[in-house]
Image (cartoon, rainbow, N blue to C red):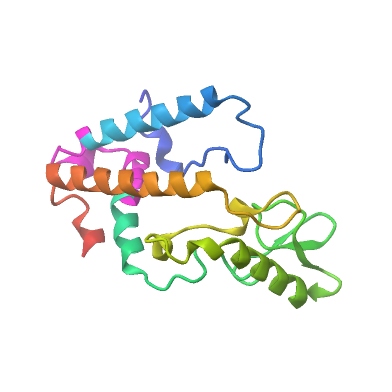
Amino acid sequence: MEHPELDKRIQRVNRVSNINTEYYKGVQLEQSYLERRKDFIKGLIERAKDKQFEKKATNFSKTILKSIIFDPMMNTAYSNNELRGTCLPGIHKLAVDSDGNFHMCEKINPHYPVGNIETGLDPTKQANYMNNFFSALAGCKNCNLNNICNLCYVITETDGQGFQLKDTFCKNFREGIINSFSTYYSILENNPGIFQEIRE
């Protein structure tokens, strides 16, 4: 990185989601991102071998590494995760559009309003969205990762046609968990004391 201090204000960078979008019209752009991310993580693991890593690394690198170390441990501590990664629509989060309509969050498309500024939240709509969402997850009961699953409305919504669980999500999520643990243990094998404060 030419300017290692440039990232002081950057704590997190999200890529464009590959769900319900044509942003990645071909697989080439997304594959390019995934390859670059993989290379970045490999480099991070290598740099983390240095016992002085915490003093030398940029804020961005430390944030990425902490999330790799922190997430698997936090996730495995949870059990009976009935809500998965979702929320109670309009309760945990609330987004308001320019017409005064309420939406369950800022990420979901406008086909799932939960009320408006004139009448407030609509409990019937909230309940319907939750019921439809959990109906779409009926096949998840026997999944051995359901207690750490981060499924939410945004991932399963179908542009106004309800909610549907795509097979690709489960495949990618499972691979992601395996990769996270692999990276996690690779880092700790190289530098057992790294970020000890967040592992106590």
Is-magenta flag for residue 60? Answer: yes
Residue 32 position within the rendered picture, expressed as x and y whole percent measured from the top left: 46, 24
Q: How many marks?
A: 0
Q: Could you say which is closer to the camera, residue 78 or residue 190?
A: 78
Does residue 85 appear in the picture of this structure?
no
Q: Is residue 42 above or below residue 185?
A: above
State which region is magenta. 46-67
Quadrant into which the C terminus falls: bottom left
Residue 85 position within the rendered picture, expressed as x and y whole percent measured from the top left: 51, 61
Q: Is residue 200 above or below residue 171?
A: below
Q: Could you say which is closer to the camera, residue 143 or residue 60?
A: 143
What residue is at 31 percent from the left and 47 percent from the top?
178
Residue 82 position within the rendered picture, expressed as x and y whole percent measured from the top left: 49, 71
What residue is at 23 percent from the left and 37 percent from the top?
45
Residue 101 position within the rendered picture, expressed as x and y whole percent measured from the top left: 80, 62
Taking the image as shown, residue 106 lies to the left or right of residue 124, namely left
Quarter assignment of residue 40? top left
Quarter assignment of residue 128? bottom right
Quadrant into which the N terminus falls: top left
What residue is at 71 percent from the left and 57 percent from the top?
162
Does residue 194 appear in the picture of this structure?
yes
What residue is at 27 percent from the left and 32 percent from the top?
42
Is-magenta flag for residue 52? Answer: yes
Taking the image as shown, residue 3 lies to the left or right of residue 89, namely left
Magenta stretch prevailing secondary structure? helix
Q: Could you say which is closer to the camera, residue 75 or residue 2?
A: 75
Looking at the image, which residue sits at the far bottom?
123
